[in-house]
Image: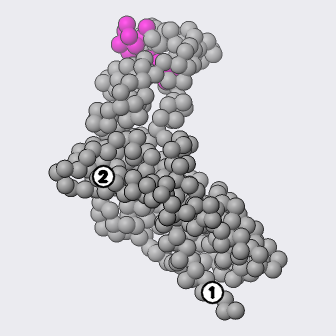
Amino acid sequence: MKKSNPIAALALLMAALIAGPASAQVNPNSPAEKACKARYDDIFGNLNSNRPDKRRISDEEIDWALNYEQVHKAGRPCSEADKPQQQASASTRQDTQPVRMVEAGGTGNAMEGQKAYNSGDFATARAKYQAGCLTDGNAVACTNLGAMASTGKGGAKDLPLARRVHKIGCAKGIAEACEHYGSMLKNGSGGPQDFAGAIAPLTTACNAKKATSCYDLGASYFYGRVGNGPDYAKARQYMAKACPGYAADGCYALALLQRDGKGGAVDLAGAARAFAQSCEAGKSDGCLEYGVAQYSGAGISADLAGARSSFGKACNTGNAGACMNAAMMARDGQGGTRDPAAAKRYFNLGCKLGIQDGCKLAGQVGA
């Protein structure tokens, strides 16, 4: 039997990653799958439409569509798109807000709050910060109170209070307060969701080099959550500011825009660099895409050994397509010596992650 051309096989697999791998458990022609696909097409059709009669797409619909992309890519039934996905979003970042040191010259309440916080007396710290913020108007006390109220430190978790005091801190020029206030507006934390209202505080924070706020701005413009639809030029502008500070997601989003020429010229060299930064920060899809660039020489010199390594790294974090690519390269000795044992392992991982061809190909490898 004639052996398949590994380069052609890899190219076909890249296309499959976009369309979603085949799965014996999912029938794309079933009524349920067709209905999900129609819903997905309607959402992004309206997002990208310039028609005056287009309907407004809710954030919930966008979230569902993003979930659908993930389950479809993994070859799982579309019903799983209704399940909440674990994402490193700005809302989860609320749980990691640091308490900032009060500068010299702060009010007595603010300074007493800082002293109590440093000694581990969080209840007293929170009470003093609250007095420092709401009575004395100290901006840093407001920011620190917001951090504690967001996480439930020193008392009950109170998102409405956190949102209120971060707003005060932001108005007084504290970049961290703007970062968290804008995030809470965007995510609907502690009050109604307000994408348009989030733009100003997020812009202030982004201009102060808060990379997560730059990413939130880029995402808002990319998905058309403000204005009359997607604005890829602004999305690209802000993703460039998010990378490399928020490397995993910010650099990955920037790379996609550069690679596809959205919001500006095609920039394959920039895309390869940003995919590499995303990969180094631990994003599986970043490693996959960087491997594709290394394999094909898109924007960088072709590097088969590097591609094999990148695919392996992405596979080890659960990326099915990368497992198949790493397996074929190990099987055929591309980018290094032939390694049937590694090829078999990668094919089996691809199989477990939903690519049925991995099961068959693993059985054909003698190891």
Query: Which corner quadrant holds the C terminus?
Result: bottom right
Q: Whole-percent x and y of residue 273?
A: 47, 64
Q: Which residues are magenta?
A: 131-149
Query: How would you rate the neighbour count of disc 2 (Cα within 10 Å): few for under 14, some for 14-19, many for 20 or more?
Result: many
Q: Which mark is residue 4?
A: 1
Q: Residue placed farthest to the front in the image?
A: 31
Residue at numbered disc 2: 47
Amino acid beneath label 1:
Ser
Q: Is 350 placed left or right of 245 in the picture?
A: right
Q: Nearer the viewer, residue 197 or 169?
A: 197
Amino acid beneath label 2:
Leu
Tell me which colouring the rendered structure shows.
Answer: one colour
Q: Tell me which residue sits at (52%, 58%) in the image.
A: 72
Q: Tell me which residue sits at (50%, 31%) in the image.
A: 94
Question: What kind of element bears circle 2?
Answer: helix
Q: Tell me which residue sits at (29%, 63%) in the image.
A: 264
Q: CA distance from mark 1 to mark 2?
A: 40 Å
Q: Nearer the viewer, residue 185 or 169?
A: 185
Q: Is residue 140 visible?
A: no
